[in-house]
Image (tube, rainbow, N blue to C red):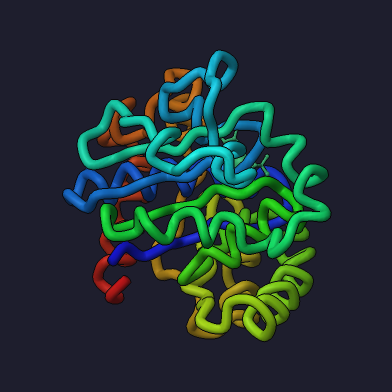
Amino acid sequence: MGRIVTVANQKGGVGKTTTAVNLGASLAAAEKTTLVIDLDPQANATSGLGIDPRPLELSSYDVLIGSREPVDTILPSSIDYLDIMPANRDLAGAEIELVDAQQREKRLNQAITAIRVQYDYIIVDCPPSLGLLTLNALCAADAVIVPLQCEYYALEGLGRLMETISIIRKDLNPTLEVDGVLLTMYDARTSLSDQVAQEVRENFDGRVFQTVIPRNVRLSESPSFGKPVLLYDARSKGSLGYLAFAKEYLEIGH
Ligand SMILES: Nc1ncnc2c1ncn2[C@@H]1O[C@H](COP(=O)(O)OP(=O)(O)OP(=O)(O)O)[C@@H](O)[C@H]1O
Ligand SMILES: [Mg+2]
């Protein structure tokens, strides 16, 4: 049965989508059948995997609303072993439309139970908020990966995210684990990156992945070509970073 991993941090631009897409691609390269679920109305994971969200008639929105089965929305990516449940603009309305729905935080969980057996990993990309979409992703997940940018204020908001995770554990998803914090956009040329990395390791003793994702221009270029970095420039530091992260993730038994 597949492991469902949510990539969450309500802070914007910390590397959630880059992590979801490139961890997904790296796991697929290791021949793990992987599904990326795009739960962000910005649809960056969708376009980053080469699918234009604009003409899409079906998306993760339809699954959340309950009008479609996951299988109706899932598309193959250009990488073997990697599928995507895309997002489109419809998703922007989901938070409001689901406000009065019963078990509104459990929509994704209920919908994807049936497809778990088809994948080794299901990776959910979240929007930068702690709204209903992120709550659905956390309720559906076995575990969370929290990307943190090696910048000032990296830890800002993290307390609230951890509180939210505790509440969800108590009320809605008792088995939710925090797999760990992933340091992203590490810049070896600045001492700031080191300071932040050290501070984060002190705060999250033992729960920070060994692998650190470097700041690498190939990672920021690849989405505009609709490719994970592994297809865009396999030997770049960014690509090697995410391959190393996938290896670490597999080795620690996830
Ligand atoms: N390691 C990296 N090196 C260089 N650029 C990066 C790296 N990781 C992410 N980026 C770039 O930084 C920007 C933000 O990254 P990303 O979209 O993954 O963050 P996000 O947390 O998903 O953002 P949002 O909160 O808007 O969804 C993007 O332009 C991305 O290409
Ligand atoms: Mg994103």
Q: Quadrant of residue 7?
A: bottom right
Quarter of the picture holding the N terminus: bottom left
Q: Is residue 64 left or right of residue 85?
A: right
Q: Is residue 193 visible?
A: no
Which is more toward the observer, 35 or 172? 172
Q: Quadrant of residue 194?
A: bottom right
Q: Is residue 55 visible?
A: yes
Spot occupied by residue 158 in the image (x, y as percentages of width and height): 72, 68
Spot occupied by residue 208 in the image (x, y as percentages of width and height): 50, 73
- Point 64% across, 44% down: residue: 65
Spot occupied by residue 250 in the image (x, y as percentages of width and height): 27, 66
Which is more toward the observer, 94 or 50? 94
Spot occupied by residue 54 in the image (x, y as percentages of width and height): 59, 16
- Point 51% across, 82% down: residue: 175
**Quadrant of the displayed image that contains ligand 2:** top right
Q: Is residue 92 left or right of residue 125?
A: right
Which is more toward the observer, 245 or 138? 138
Image height of 156 relative to 164, above or below: above
- Point 25% across, 71% down: residue: 251
- Point 26% across, 61% down: residue: 247
Which is more toward the observer, 10 or 151? 10
